[in-house]
Image (tube, rainbow, N blue to C red):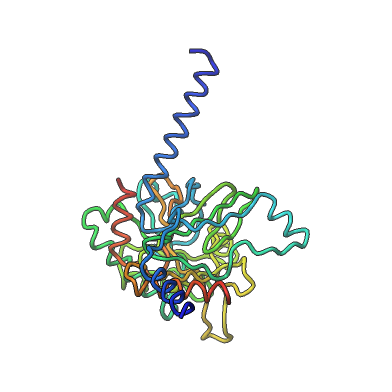
Amino acid sequence: MAIATAALAAVGWAAFTPVTFASREETFEIPKGTWARRMAGNKAEILPSQVFLTLGVRDVLLLKNMDDVPQIFGPTLMMPGQSFRLPFEVASSYQFACTAHASGQMTVVVDEQPDTPWRRLAWRTRRIFRIVA
Amino acid sequence: MNYTTRLATLLACTLLSLTARAADFEGLKAGVFTPAREAPDFSVRGSDGTALTLSRYRGKVVLLGFGYTSCPNVCPVTLAVLAQAHRKLGPLGSQVQVIYLTVDPERDNAERLKQYLAAFDPTFVGGTGTAAQMAAVRSSYGVTAEKHGTGSDYAVAHSSFVYLITRDGRLRALMPFGHKADDYVHDISMLLN
């Protein structure tokens, strides 16, 4: 009984609590010295090969190159100190060529706006699976 | 006002101005570069038979795309969208120039580019050159192109976005593949203003 009540409360919370983020921007930054570290053999990934965004709450990809050299970052070439702000308005899966990844591809998955109880529930469920996966 | 105060005021004004300028472009549908760097100039063979340079179009908003005439899907869609946007702009369209540089200089000569682009819009200009020339231009813009297949029926996988270059030659934004003509009209109108 207690478990069922707790599960129901969790589902109710997931369905009725609005999805919010502090900013609509999902930011990725190439730190200073990245190129030098890569040249030294450190192959740390900065940008994941899959980025998940959500319309209306977090639907802007913001890339920043804080390194001292130009970098191919996501879909584009960025100069030192330059940022690239890419907004999304349609829920879909976007493929970009990206030489920073071994696959040569980067995918931006934009989910629908979680503006109804059912969509909020689905959005939170997907998020749990993505974190676990 | 002493020198230090004047300098601080000047720096603050410059910073405010830059911030305001960056904020001006946040409404673009395309991805926005901040700060916008100078778009790398190039000199290749134009589909109109003359030397094609980017600087020739200073004063216009330039939409710069990369593709090839044998492209089975991406290029026809992109060019059709650009042609539609160009028509929708009406008289403002004369202040916009579409440049399409080939990623397949082996097959795309100036004449072939001219015929291909004219099918979409006769004002579009294409550019071709030696493989090394075109590779250098791609590199300066961070554009990828990779040949797949052998023989004469090969394909070229290439970056599918379009660069938006301001009247003063700044590389301001990048429109990913899949946007509609209205998005281009929206952004071009902002850049023209």
Residue B171 visible to the viewer: yes
- Quadrant position of residue B127: bottom left
The x and y percentages for residue B9 are: 47, 23
Taking the view exactly as shown, the residue that stands out farthest to the right is A40
Q: Quadrant of the C terminus of chain A?
A: bottom right
Q: Nearer the viewer, residue B3 or B151?
A: B3
The x and y percentages for residue B26 are: 38, 50
Q: Nearer the viewer, residue A124 or B186?
A: A124
- Quadrant position of residue B136: bottom right
Q: Residue at x 44, y 68 (%)?
A: B110
- Quadrant position of residue A13: bottom left
The x and y percentages for residue B157 are: 52, 76
In the rendered view, does A72 fall on the left or right side of B64?
right
Taking the view exactly as shown, the residue that stands out farthest to the left is B90
Q: Nearer the viewer, residue B12 or B188?
A: B12
Q: Residue at x 59, y 63 (%)?
A: A47
Q: Residue at x 77, y 62 (%)?
A: A41
Relative height, residue B165 to residue B130 (above, below): above
Relative height, residue A85 to residue A98 (above, below): above
Q: How many numbered discs sit on the rendered protein?
A: 0
Residue B50 visible to the viewer: no
The x and y percentages for residue B86 are: 28, 61
Taking the view exactly as shown, the residue that stands out farthest to the top is B1
In the rendered view, does B189 fall on the left or right side of A51?
left
